[in-house]
Amino acid sequence: METIPPLAALAALVSAMAHAGMALYTKRAEDTLTFRALSNIFSALWLSPVLFLFPVPGWEVWRFLILGAALIWAFNMLMISAFRRGSMNLVYPVMRGAAPAIAGLFAFVFLGEPLSPLAILGLSAASAAIIAFAWPEKGGAPKAAAIGFALSAAMMTASYTVNDASGVRAAGSALLYAAWFFVLSATSLTLTAWVRRGDQLPAIARTELRGAVIGSFFNVTTYGLALYAYANAPVAPMAALRETSVVFGAILAALILKEPLGVRRIALAVVLALGLAAIQLG
């Protein structure tokens, strides 16, 4: 069995916590698109010294960066739409949890890839937890739109995770890949915000400035540590550790946003995280 470096495992776990923190600040933003654009601009600024310390990557890295930038742009648009339509402790677990579950199911059904008994158990548990999260509550508001956008965002997550794991290995440096990634992401999101907000963008940006600065640290932390983990350890167990973000996200939504959580959703978040870990490890 391949040994997992303790530092890589710690990096994946802290990355999960930081991802939940990033989602919290995204949910709290008044104008989510402007917030995401600003937080990516600041993320690029914090990593900008790296651009001058390393040579510009070659095409073998840029092909992953360009595809990754397109995928993360689509993810941001879908995440914004999901957060507008649903609470964080509904949307976030589905958005984070569906990606590995869908990938595992599609690989089994369409590609004929075998699944171990542990992976089948994990896939069943994760799928059941996602369905339970989406299940209409008595007298509750419809969830179809929020869940639809969350599932679509999950598909983008599955795509950019595989792409970036390949890209950072081609780059040979997690810092270098992350620095250029945030430059491209900040550019695409800022242009989108400018087109959609027009002359109102500077005024809106001022109201989102403080939260965006804080959010940028979560951005850099979660992405940078994930790349470090993927570059220095097998992707599957690192991805499994990162899925604990669904639990951290549910707790933050309850404590900070005062969203109803209860025993049911706590249990579902734990079952979902354990199921996702079983998929990756199996």
Image (cartoon, grey):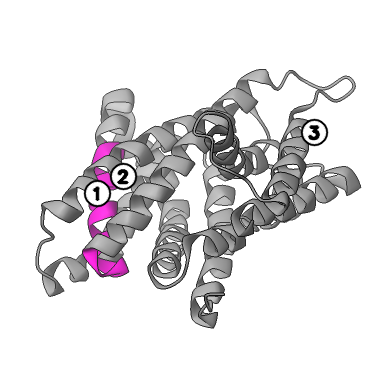
Q: Where is residue 265 in the image (x, y as percent from the top left)?
A: 82, 44
- Residue at the location (72% across, 50% down)? 117
**Crowdedness near tag 3: few (<14), some (14–19) or many (≥20) residues, C-alpha within 10 Å:** some
CB contact under 8 Å: marks 1 and 2: yes
Helix, strand or loop for disc 2: helix
On the question of residue 249 being in view, the answer is no
Q: Earlier in the sequence, mark 3 or mark 1?
A: 1
How many marks are shown on the rendered structure? 3
Q: Mark 1 points at which residue?
A: 65
**Crowdedness near tag 1: few (<14), some (14–19) or many (≥20) residues, C-alpha within 10 Å:** many
Kind of residue indicated by mark 3: Ala
Kind of residue indicated by mark 2: Gly
| Magenta extent | 171-190
Q: In which quarter of the image is the C terminus?
A: bottom right
Q: Where is residue 53 in the image (x, y as percent from the top left)?
A: 14, 74
Mark drawn on residue 136: none
Q: Name the residue under label 3.
A: 132
